[in-house]
Amino acid sequence: MNRRVFIKAAGLTVAAGMMNVCGCTSMRAGMSNRKPNIIFVLADDLGYGDLGCYGQRRIKTPNLDRMAAEGMRFTQHYAGSTVCAPSRCVLMTGLHTGHSMIRGNALVPLRSEDVTVAERLKDAGYATVLCGKWGLGEAGSTGIPNRKGFDYFFGYLSQVHAHNYYPDFLCRNEDVVKLKNIVDHPLRNGEPSLGGVSSNKVEYSHDLIVAEALNFIEKNSRHPFFLYLAVTTPHANNEAGKEGMEVPEYGLYKDMDWPDPQKGHAAMITRMDRDIGRLFDLLKKLGIDENTMVFFASDNGPHREGGNDSDFNDSNGPLRGIKRDLYEGGIRVPMIARWPGRIAAGKTSDHISAFWDFMPTACQAAGVKAPRGIDGISYLPELLGGRQEGHNFLYWEFHERGSKQAVRMGPWKLIRFIANTDKVELFNLEKDPGETTDIAEKHPEIVKTIMEYLQTARTPSETWSLVKGKA
């Protein structure tokens, strides 16, 4: 289905109603709930410093702070990329951006042969659901959620569509669900874009997505399930300009002497935090809290879009850089894991880990083998207090504003700027987590070792070539 047909189809009203995805096979209905349920909540453009448990002082996040107090808070966890689509691809496939199919924000879908964590967990007898933003395959492609292991999907296929918090439709599986919002979709290259701004703002997509997720849990609480809750907060609606921090109300921040975009940004985060609290309340009500692993992270660092100023509330905390940077502020993200009775409460971990580790972690917890050849290492031992294997290197590449690469090796972090100068910068993150001082000239042997690694760190890609360009 192309964009023109998809937009037209959005005018059709598709009957709503949550399906019980576990009813699809008797085998799955008979599974014992000894396997842990797995929930991964992914925020969108939430900075390392945006949560109270990571040092935020003005934006209120009591439920996520409590999650950290009841679980494990990671201080050196990394997103798959510094922008949306590749980061989510890495999370789903266990392959870093040197090997993943999607390495930038472009209309490139996952292929049939790309294996996702949902597919592996489905093989292990899990019901699988995605509520929220996908971004790894648009309508009719090989990469849509229902073709990549998810029994049920509700939300946005397109990352551009997901900019708008008041869309005129959302997707349910391969259908469209008409909403009450009215959106005039602008044209791009002669085709209607999925982006836009609502003229009436009736139904807030975040609330609909969370409601679907909670409904799924209620209907499937007797069976092992995997819920990928990919909320869109606090991303901006880029098409709305300086009014892009769309939220129904400013709440706690209504009377603050702040610019409106900052009120909206904070209100988005606190609204998301409220819904994390609702999720935990439901797990306890259903008696499955102690059999459910819950992870929370962000897809990349904070943004300066929609009128938001990431410095206003110190969204990147002590780190340098934001979204679209390969400095720490663009890729180091908050990550919290909670599993009552299994993950010790109140623990802080400095284990160096990344999105590509989620695939083997989830597979190990579910008792199924991870795909061969992935880049991830399970951090389940770290969660459970065991002996944890570490990475020799972590790797990223990024293709906007000229190609860039970054590598972390122990305390060392190297960034290679291929555009124009092909220069490198080196930092010691143990001594300089804010990456204030480039010490490449002082440590040529470290630079040499990492540059040698870069010769084998990636597989060639016709779509994602490392070329010089304008920075």
Image: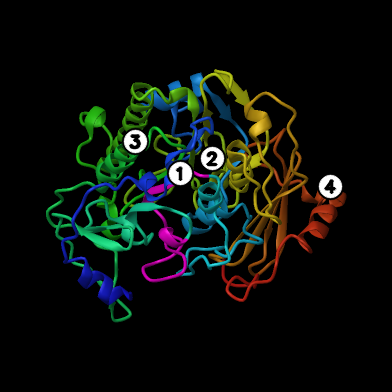
Name the mark nearer the viewer: 3 or 4. 3
Name the mark nearer the viewer: 4 or 2. 2
Q: Secondary structure at mark 3?
A: helix
Q: For residue 142: magenta? A: yes
**Which residue was labeled with disc 1?**
28
Q: Secondary structure at mark 1?
A: helix
Where residue 333 is drawn, which disc sits there?
A: 2
- As measured in the structure, the alpha-carbon distance from the residue carrying label 3 to the one carrying label 2 is 16 Å
Kindly tell me whether residue 467 is visible in this rendering: yes
**Which residue was labeled with disc 4?**
443
- N-terminal of the pair, mark 4 or mark 1, is 1
Q: How would you rate the neighbour count of disc 1 (Cα within 10 Å): few for under 14, some for 14-19, many for 20 or more? A: some
Q: How would you rate the neighbour count of disc 4 (Cα within 10 Å): few for under 14, some for 14-19, many for 20 or more? A: few
Q: How many marks?
A: 4
**Which residue was labeled with disc 3?**
272
Is residue 58 positioned above or below 112 on the image? above
- N-terminal of the pair, mark 2 or mark 1, is 1
The amino acid pointed to by label 3 is: Met
Asked whether the beta carbons under mark 4 and mark 1 sit within 8 Å of each other, the answer is no
- As measured in the structure, the alpha-carbon distance from the residue carrying label 3 to the one carrying label 4 is 44 Å
**What quarter of the picture does the N terminus occupy?**
bottom left
**Residue 379's image quarter?**
top right
- N-terminal of the pair, mark 3 or mark 4, is 3
